[in-house]
Image: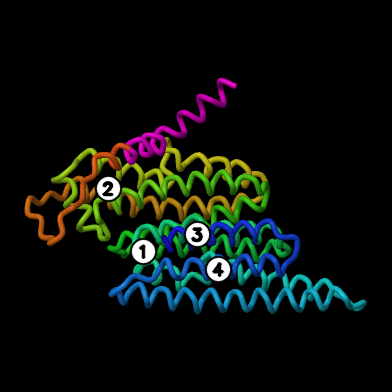
């Protein structure tokens, strides 16, 4: 019952933050969201969740302090006659840095994979999807320096692709993939801010599908996923297709928002677009490596104490969401041509 209450206040905090008329209201919404998510992270007799909740609180409190300090200075400067553009730009960059730290974008990303490693799949899903809405929308309101945003895009796509190469934990792989996707979402602000909403919805849909599958079969590491082939090859195939869709491989659904962003960036930001595509190919490489190894590696001996859970009702929902994830691009193309 208390989890349901905290879920309601978590959603309320985000709604207050993105619909507020003042900067103090946005800060209050972010704090409500933070204080609602921390109790959901704590699990009894689990030291990793307690460590993750403390780290998350410290990082978010630091980002909130920077955000509050910046908006207070900005309010003071707005009442002064001698106001310069340099101070405004510096304060906006400070606000942007605080928001980027809250969402886990590079180079403020160091807390993100470590905290995700100590959480269950439900909290991981919330942290990678819902918790990015308020900072991302507030970031779209405060863009002043395009050079700073381009630097964030470059380093986020670079760190998100390189960081996941040597990981064996699925939560860390999804965390670094999320950092890479943050770079793509921020790049949509350079031309059309509404594109990131479509990108975020498609990314959230694929991420929720994957986390549901991993949670349903109690999978946290690559070795467990390799051994899943001996139990249910259909679910294994669906999992591989969702990973490739998350990586942005055409003709899957995850390629559609990247396709649109590439079309927009090709007009004015050609070199940025080429770099982002190269980094996404690296991300797609370790997804292809996971897929290739999972199909080839076969072992009849299941050396885990806890057997994989199998719920047919949940599997039907997972298969339905996987069908949309795989064929979404074809369906959307058909609908666009039809209308």
Q: What's the residue at 56%, 23% (across, down)? A: 337
Could you tell which of marks 4 and 2 lies nearer the N-terminus?
4
Which numbered circle lies on residue 269? Answer: none
The residue furthest left is 301
Q: What's the residue at 38%, 39% (across, down)? A: 321
Q: Nearer the viewer, mark 4 or mark 1?
A: 4
Q: Residues within 10 Å of mark 4 (few under 14, many from 20)?
A: many
Distance Cα–Cα, label 4 vs label 2: 32 Å
Q: Which residue is mark 1?
A: 172
The residue furthest right is 81
Q: Which residues are magenta?
A: 317-339
Is 121 inside the magenta-drawn segment? no
Could you tell which of marks 2 and 1 lies nearer the N-terminus?
1
Q: Secondary structure at mark 2?
A: helix
Q: What's the residue at 50%, 24% (across, down)? A: 334
Q: Secondary structure at mark 3?
A: helix
Could you tell which of marks 4 and 3 lies nearer the N-terminus?
4
Q: Nearer the viewer, mark 3 or mark 1?
A: 1
Q: Which residue is mark 3?
A: 157
Distance Cα–Cα, label 4 vs label 3: 17 Å
Q: Nearer the viewer, mark 4 or mark 2?
A: 4
Q: What's the residue at 45%, 29% (across, down)? A: 330
Q: Which residue is mark 4?
A: 102
| Residue 266 location (% of width, % of height) | 62, 45
């Amino acid at each position: 019952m208390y989890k349901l209450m905290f879920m309601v206040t978590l959603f309320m905090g985000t709604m207050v933050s993105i619909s507020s008329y003042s900067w103090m209201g946005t800060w209050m919404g972010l704090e409500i969201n933070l204080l609602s998510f921390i109790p959901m992270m704590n699990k009894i007799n689990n030291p990793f969740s307690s460590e993750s909740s403390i780290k998350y609180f410290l990082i978010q409190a630091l980002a909130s302090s920077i955000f509050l300090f910046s908006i207070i200075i900005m309010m003071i400067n707005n009442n002064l006659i001698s106001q310069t553009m340099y101070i405004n730009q510096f304060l906006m960059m400070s606000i942007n840095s605080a928001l980027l730290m809250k969402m886990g974008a590079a180079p403020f990303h160091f807390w993100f994979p470590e905290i995700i490693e100590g959480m269950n799949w439900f909290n991981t899903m919330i942290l990678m999807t819902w918790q990015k809405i308020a900072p991302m929308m507030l970031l779209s309101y405060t863009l002043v320096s395009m050079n700073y945003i381009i630097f964030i895009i470059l380093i986020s796509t670079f760190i998100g692709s390189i960081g996941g190469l040597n990981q064996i934990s699925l939560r860390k792989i999804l965390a670094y993939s999320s950092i890479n996707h943050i770079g793509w979402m921020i790049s949509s602000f350079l031309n059309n801010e509404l594109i990131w909403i479509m990108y975020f919805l498609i990314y959230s849909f694929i991420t929720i599908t994957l986390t549901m599958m991993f949670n349903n079969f109690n999978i946290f590491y690559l070795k467990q996923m390799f051994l899943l082939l001996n139990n249910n090859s259909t679910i294994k195939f669906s999992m591989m297709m969702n990973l490739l869709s998350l990586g942005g491989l055409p003709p899957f659904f995850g390629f559609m928002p990247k396709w649109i962003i590439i079309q927009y960036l090709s007009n004015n930001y050609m070199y940025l677009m080429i770099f982002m595509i190269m980094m996404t190919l690296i991300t797609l490489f370790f997804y292809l490596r996971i897929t290739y190894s999972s199909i080839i590696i076969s072992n009849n001996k299941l050396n885990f104490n806890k057997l994989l859970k199998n719920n047919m009702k949940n599997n039907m929902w997972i298969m339905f969401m996987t069908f949309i994830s795989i064929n979404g691009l074809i369906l959307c193309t058909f609908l666009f041509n039809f209308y």
